[in-house]
């Protein structure tokens, strides 16, 4: 009889895991349990009235190859969509006004002198303080430090509050005062170690890319050329994965409530079902995996130690003439110290072509994030009112949107806090004590789609190998 694998959670991690296991061993019996009525997890695209709206992720970075590789393996190359070549820049809010992020600014530090000296985003003192990065001694202690600790120490408080916090907060929905540098931005730590300076490290990295003929990566500034989407939105990837799975593999509306080791295998159960499998893979947020691993309190406790933040993404459709401000960038980020509900706003139909009819603009407004989760649970009309008030102040938007679609993401983004890498190493070590148990998901070694895919493929191949080992 063919051997069996239960995969729990049909976000991108669970889908890629099930696909990879079946690709490795087509004769496996795989069941992919998803609690909701649709697969995709955080990924959800809507296509209606000539619009493509994204409730979750809208892009994949290509310098981590696993996302692109999966698209190629699934025959999706022809549907990959680059960002618009025009308007590849972003803004940041300073004292209630939108100001361009200076050309050459790379998340934490500048790589080009003139735009940096001229930018009104930072005060003259703040700029001087960033310059000290060139001469400050490097830190010797090997212990992990927070992102805020690192940026404050090397580049100063203003660089943290005005640039690093909104830019990094945008990626993790996180609080730099708690995020681990080693787990989130290890390359900046490496720059300090090797070059004694973040700025010198960035410049050296750009020179190396230039030498290797790597044009997009060698660019100074936000590297929008490195991001891609898919025609019809990121959900195209989910749909293709589902279509590739044999019939009957995906089972939606199946919340798994129990996972237990039994002699020679695993038992998986929920309302109205209890089934036995030879192996089980949890492709879930770490807190959900914690709830299903109570058979090992140490493992469950460690998984529960990874905190998650919540956020909301509101898609808003406007007629172009309702927006007096120029819409000639990919959007803006809002530092916390500006005290707004809005965390960031993407000009979605500028970033990717073909996402709104001529004369209309789709904006994606984000709120919530670490420490501001309460915003996500506010009544929809109240949150919308505040978001619209911020958009009115910042872009001068007049009147009501033609269409609104809010996607709320409860505890979807993990926060890689101080000590995260040790926590994950402990989880992996503990999971190995349970033959036939595999873990994947965004809680461990990377939150982006390519990170999730890489970890899931690896777990899928390991699961298939486990199931084919001699008895
Ligand atoms: C607003 C937003 C924007 C983002 N933007 C980007 C971006 O542009 N680029 C990028 O690369 N990444 C982005 N990310 C991150 C990325 O989308 C996620 O990290 C990734 O999609 C997570 O996938 P996952 O499969 O690991 O988890 P999830 O998508 O959370 O999937 C987990 C699945 O498990 C199911 N589940 C949970 N418990 C159970 C249970 N007991 N039984 C059965 N099923 C269960 C859930 O219903 C869900 O479908 C973004 C995330 C968010 C929230």
Image (cartoon, rainbow, N blue to C red):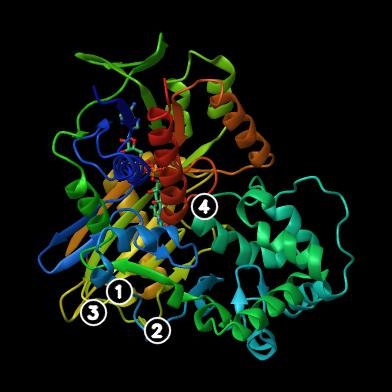
Q: Which mark is residue 49?
A: none
Residue at 26% across / 39% down in the picture?
26
Q: Residue 338, how many percent across, how many down?
A: 55, 62
The C terminus - image quarter:
top left
Residue at 47% across / 52% down in the picture?
451
> On the rendering, which quadrant does ligand 1 occupy?
top left
For mark 4, give the secondary structure: helix
Q: Earlier in the sequence, mark 3 or mark 1?
A: 3
Q: Which residue is mark 2?
A: 87
Taking depth in this image into account, of 182 and 259 the one nearest to the observer is: 259
Asked if marks 3 and 1 touch (Cβ < 8 Å), the reply is: no
Q: Which mark is residue 320?
A: 3
Q: How many marks?
A: 4
For mark 3, give the secondary structure: helix
Q: Residue 236, how many percent across, how many down?
A: 23, 58
Q: Nearer the viewer, mark 2 or mark 3?
A: 2
Residue at 71% across / 78% down in the picture?
204
Q: Earlier in the sequence, mark 1 or mark 4?
A: 4
Q: Nearer the viewer, mark 1 or mark 2?
A: 1
Taking depth in this image into account, of 333 and 178 the one nearest to the observer is: 178
Q: Which mark is residue 352?
A: 1
Residue at 67% across / 78% down in the picture?
110
Whether label 1 lies within 8 Å of ligand 1 gets the answer: no
Q: Earlier in the sequence, mark 1 or mark 2?
A: 2
Asked if marks 2 and 3 touch (Cβ < 8 Å), the reply is: no
Q: Which residue is mark 4?
A: 172
């Amino acid at each position: 009889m063919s051997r069996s694998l239960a995969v729990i959670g049909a976000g991108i991690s669970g889908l890629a895991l099930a696909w990879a296991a079946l690709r490795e061993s087509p004769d496996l019996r795989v069941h992919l349990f998803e609690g909701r009525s649709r697969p995709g997890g955080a990924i959800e695209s809507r296509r209606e009235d000539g619009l493509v709206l994204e409730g979750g992720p809208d892009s994949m970075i290509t310098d981590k190859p696993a996302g692109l590789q999966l698209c190629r393996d699934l025959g999706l190359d022809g549907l990959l969509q680059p960002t618009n070549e025009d308007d590849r820049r972003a803004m940041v809010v300073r004292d209630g006004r939108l100001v361009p992020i200076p050309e050459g600014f790379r998340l934490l530090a500048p790589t080009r002198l003139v735009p940096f000296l001229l930018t009104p985003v930072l005060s003259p003192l703040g700029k001087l303080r960033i310059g000290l990065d060139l001469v400050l001694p490097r830190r010797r202690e090997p212990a992990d430090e927070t992102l805020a600790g690192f940026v404050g120490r090397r580049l100063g408080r203003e660089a943290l509050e005005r640039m690093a916090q909104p830019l990094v907060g945008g990626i993790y929905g996180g609080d730099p005062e708690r995020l681990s540098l080693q787990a989130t931005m290890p390359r900046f730590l490496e720059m300090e170690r090797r070059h004694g300076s973040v700025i010198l490290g960035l410049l050296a990295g750009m020179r190396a890319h230039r030498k290797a003929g790597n044009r997009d990566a060698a660019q100074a500034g936000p590297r929008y050329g490195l991001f891609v989407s898919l025609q019809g939105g990121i959900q195209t990837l989910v749909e293709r994965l589902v279509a590739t799975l044999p019939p009957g593999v995906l089972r939606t509306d199946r919340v798994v409530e129990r996972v237990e080791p039994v002699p020679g295998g695993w038992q998986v159960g929920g309302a109205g079902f209890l089934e036995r499998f030879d192996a089980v893979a949890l492709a879930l947020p770490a807190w959900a995996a914690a709830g299903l691993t109570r058979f090992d309190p140490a493992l469950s406790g460690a998984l529960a130690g990874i905190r998650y933040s919540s956020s909301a993404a509101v898609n808003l459709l406007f007629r172009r003439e309702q927006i007096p401000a120029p819409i000639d960038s990919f959007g803006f980020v809002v530092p916390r110290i500006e005290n707004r509900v809005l965390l960031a706003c993407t000009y979605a139909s500028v970033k990717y072509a073909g996402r709104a009819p001529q004369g209309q603009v789709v904006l994606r407004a984000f709120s919530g994030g670490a420490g501001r989760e309460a915003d996500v649970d506010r009544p929809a009309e109240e949150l919308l009112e505040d978001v619209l008030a911020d958009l009115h102040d910042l872009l001068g938007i007049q009147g009501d949107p033609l269409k609104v679609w809010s996607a709320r993401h409860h505890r979807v983004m993990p926060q890689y806090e101080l000590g995260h890498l040790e926590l994950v190493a402990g989880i992996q070590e503990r999971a190995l004590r349970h033959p036939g148990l595999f873990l994947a998901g965004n809680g461990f070694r990377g939150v982006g789609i390519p990170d999730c895919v890489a970890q899931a493929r690896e777990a899928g191949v390991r699961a298939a190998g486990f199931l084919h080992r001699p008895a």
